[in-house]
Image (spheres, rainbow, N blue to C red):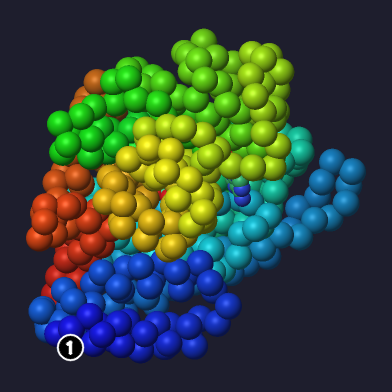
Amino acid sequence: MTNNVYDQLVNDFMAKIIAKNAGETEFHQAVREVVETLVPFIEENPQYKEAKILERIAEPERVILFRVPWVDDKGEIQINKGYRIEMNSAIGPYKGGLRFHPTVNLGILKFLAYEQVYKNSLTTLPMGGGKGGSDFDPKGKSDNEVMKFCQSFMTELCKHIGPNTDVPAGDIGVGGREIGFLFGQYKRIRNEFTGVLTGKGREWGGSRIRPEATGYGATYFAAEMLKTRGDSLEGKVVAISGSGNVAQYACEKVTELGGKVVTLSDSSGFIYDPEGISKEKLAYIMHLKNVKRGRIKEYAEKYRCEYHEGIRPWGVKCDVAMPNATQNEINEDEAKMLVANGCFCISEGANMPSTPEAVEVYQKAKILYGPGKAANAGGVAVSGLEMSQNSLRLSWTREEVDGRLQNIMKDIHGTCVKYGTVDDKYIDYVKGANIGGFVKIADAMLAQGIV
Ligand code: NDP
Ligand code: 2IT
């Protein structure tokens, strides 16, 4: 079949998706990227085509929408939206994070849930895909308000989740504090102490390395990609966006492996520290962001480096870039700047941080490009390990969990190489991750009949 025929098949498929899911632009974007790489594969494997596996994967098994009323510190009633998308349970219970951010809507959560299905399959662990969250904005709220909101959110969510049904975790705006409040309320209502959430505190069922896992995993994935060119992170200049959970631990691991992190950001701007963000400076950032809940600008004031308000860090000179903040945070022009400045490796800690046009720039330039569903799978992988430890009622050491995480990231990289190596030896990690993730889910769905 020619490329034109494939393009037509993709366009026909997408026309139906867009008609059925009007206005959900991020969801359309995530589905299109997968379908573009899968259509030729499915034409060669008609069993998947006849069973309409791709069409079925794009329709959530269940969507739960609910009201979240709560009372703020002034005594005023607040109403937020609550969501849980139970996308696919072919290979295990629904698994995926909760996002609390004012931009959250159905289309964003469906894109995240869709990505999660493939990502979880890639981890080699038995986890289906889901995602949830709320348009609640934790910024500027007191601990009491966050707790009140979490309790109200869980009062409804607890009817739909469980350790063998659906296991939420963190994402943007949901970290250890929120998981604690959510777990407390689940336990109180259901009267059971189970592994219903991951990312729990260490004293009450959490896994070692779970906080570190996404950032460490994305760094291990970058190291694996560099290895294919006989290279390593040693001496590399690395630009990172974000300054939350993923960014902090990516910064820690890159530095440990001999790289130099020169940028971090938040939604207000980015800091540029050409001397590198050392262990000591990172400790300051962790306190600033996780305890004081302050702005990244304060780093520039303390360490007297550049701060750029209102722009993202992709104009700086770097060898490696790790977008670790949010979706569509690298556009075509920024991708061109990165490549022009010599960046040759992108490992995505965030979900879908590059626009389709940016991805095209990377692929044309033949740089190493690890898409989020492969590169950031370390977080959910260690969530899977947390579930295993909860079931076994024991907890593994740091070394044990970190060793497993490293092996999983190597396996995912191997899967990408297996399915994504193209004729001239270029590894198309997008193709590799999509096909590699798809096969396991598709075969499970075939075996389980029309459900
Ligand atoms: P956090 O809430 O800990 O941090 C998010 C960071 O990104 C903050 O610095 C935040 O800045 C910035 N950010 C968020 N939204 C925007 C925006 N619209 N524009 C600019 N900056 C923004 O979240 P995580 O670190 O957990 O998540 C970061 C990314 O990693 C997300 O894409 C998430 O889906 C993905 N991810 C997370 C995993 C996890 O285990 N936590 C696992 C896999 C992927 P500010 O404080 O100003 O809002
Ligand atoms: O996007 C993601 O993979 C996450 N936010 C982590 C999900 C999880 O269940 O640990």
Q: Which residue is at the front of the view, 282 or 450? A: 282
- Asked whether residue 327 appears in the rendered view, the answer is no
- Asked whether residue 309 appears in the rendered view, the answer is yes
Position of 342 relative to 95 (above/below):
above
- Measured as percent of width and height from the top left, residue 378 is found at 32, 40
Quick one: SS at disc 1? Answer: helix
Apparent side of residue 431 relative to residue 144 in the rendered image (left or right): left
- Measured as percent of width and height from the top left, residue 264 is found at 55, 31
- Measured as percent of width and height from the top left, residue 196 is found at 42, 47
Which residue does the image show at 64% across and 51% down from the upper left?
101
Which residue does the image show at 51% across and 67% down from the upper left?
26
Looking at the rendered structure, the kind of residue marked 1 is Glu
Identity of the residue furthest to the top in this view? 280
Position of 450 relative to 228 (above/below):
below
Which residue does the image show at 17% across and 66% down from the upper left?
439
Which residue does the image show at 34% across and 25% down from the upper left?
236
- Residue 443 figure quarter: bottom left
Apparent side of residue 45 relative to residue 116 in the rendered image (left or right): left
Q: Quadrant of the C terminus?
A: bottom left
How many numbered marks, from 0 up? 1
**Quarter of the image where ligand 1 sits:** top right
- Measured as percent of width and height from the top left, residue 145 is found at 75, 41
What residue is shown with label 1?
50
- Residue 203 figure quarter: top left
Q: Is ligand 2 less than 8 Å from the beta carbon at label 1?
A: no
